[in-house]
Amino acid sequence: MSARENILARIAKARGQAATADIEDVIRRHPRGPIPPLEKNLAQRFGEQATRLASDVAGAATMTEVPGLVARYLSERGLPLQAVCWPGLAALDWRAAGIAAQARAARGDDMVGITGAFAGIAETGTLMLLSGPQTPATASLLPETHIAVVEKARIVATMEDAWDRLRNEHGILPRAVNFVSGPSRTADVEQTVTLGAHGPYRVLIIVVGEGFLSK
């Protein structure tokens, strides 16, 4: 018996056998609670909310513009022009932009990690990232600077929409789903917010798609 089946069996025993069927039905239906209305321009809302979370936000009309935007961002902050990236981004012309990019998982000494994103959530300005061989989670978690590239078409209204999209496109969930809401932060010490305590100090989100203007 799996851990999940064991938990459901214990619940059923406590509430009666009908409870198991009820629970399974709820899991299959994924019912939603109340959801606030959002304006139609989801990309603009996403950018505004991400900025409120202390992320930097930039726009690119096409993927070919991404290396140049990354190089400018790193240079303006005096950061090294070298990075690790997801394999799916390795084909971009990083060399022409002056960036030494390696397609691999990040190590503890890597300073910049460049990733894609499965979805952007407009309601909160949050990125949804899936783990896997081609999308190593370490690239967004270990480096001090995380640069995420998200297509404008993959920005959805709510987290519920993001989960629906994941189920529809992948069916089986990956081992890990990570949500990035700006730089890592904590207020454990004297209630003072400190960035970069458990992850990146800074986050740059590049939204790729016509018509997106960052502020």
Image (cartoon, helix red, strand yellow):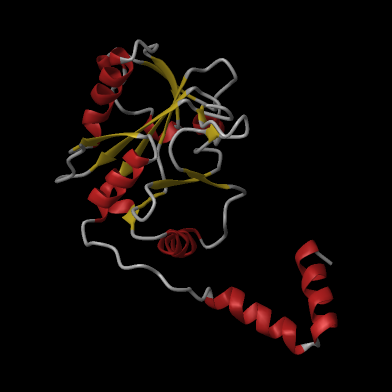
Please name the residue shown 58% across and 21% down the image.
Answer: 107
Q: Residue furthest left?
A: 211
Q: In this view, does 82 lie above or below 208?
A: above
Q: In this view, does 122 lie above or below 199?
A: below
Q: Residue 115's x, y, as percent? A: 42, 34
Q: Which residue lies furthest to the front in this view?
A: 190
- In this image, 212 relative to 82: left or right? left
Front-lying residue, 48 or 156: 48
Q: Residue 199's x, y, as percent? A: 55, 29
- In this image, 159 relative to 20: left or right? left
Q: Is residue 67 above or below residue 126?
A: above
How many labels were placed on the picture? Answer: 0
Q: Quadrant of the N terminus?
A: bottom right
Please name the residue shown 59% across and 30% down the image.
Answer: 198
Q: Residue 99's x, y, as percent? A: 34, 15
Please name the residue shown 28% across and 45% down the image.
Answer: 48
Q: Residue 151's x, y, as percent? A: 30, 45
Front-lying residue, 44 or 111: 44
- Quarter of the rendering containing residue 11: bottom right
Q: In which quarter of the image is the C terminus?
A: top left
Please name the residue shown 29% across and 18% down the image.
Answer: 71
Front-lying residue, 24 or 191: 191
Front-lying residue, 101 or 197: 197
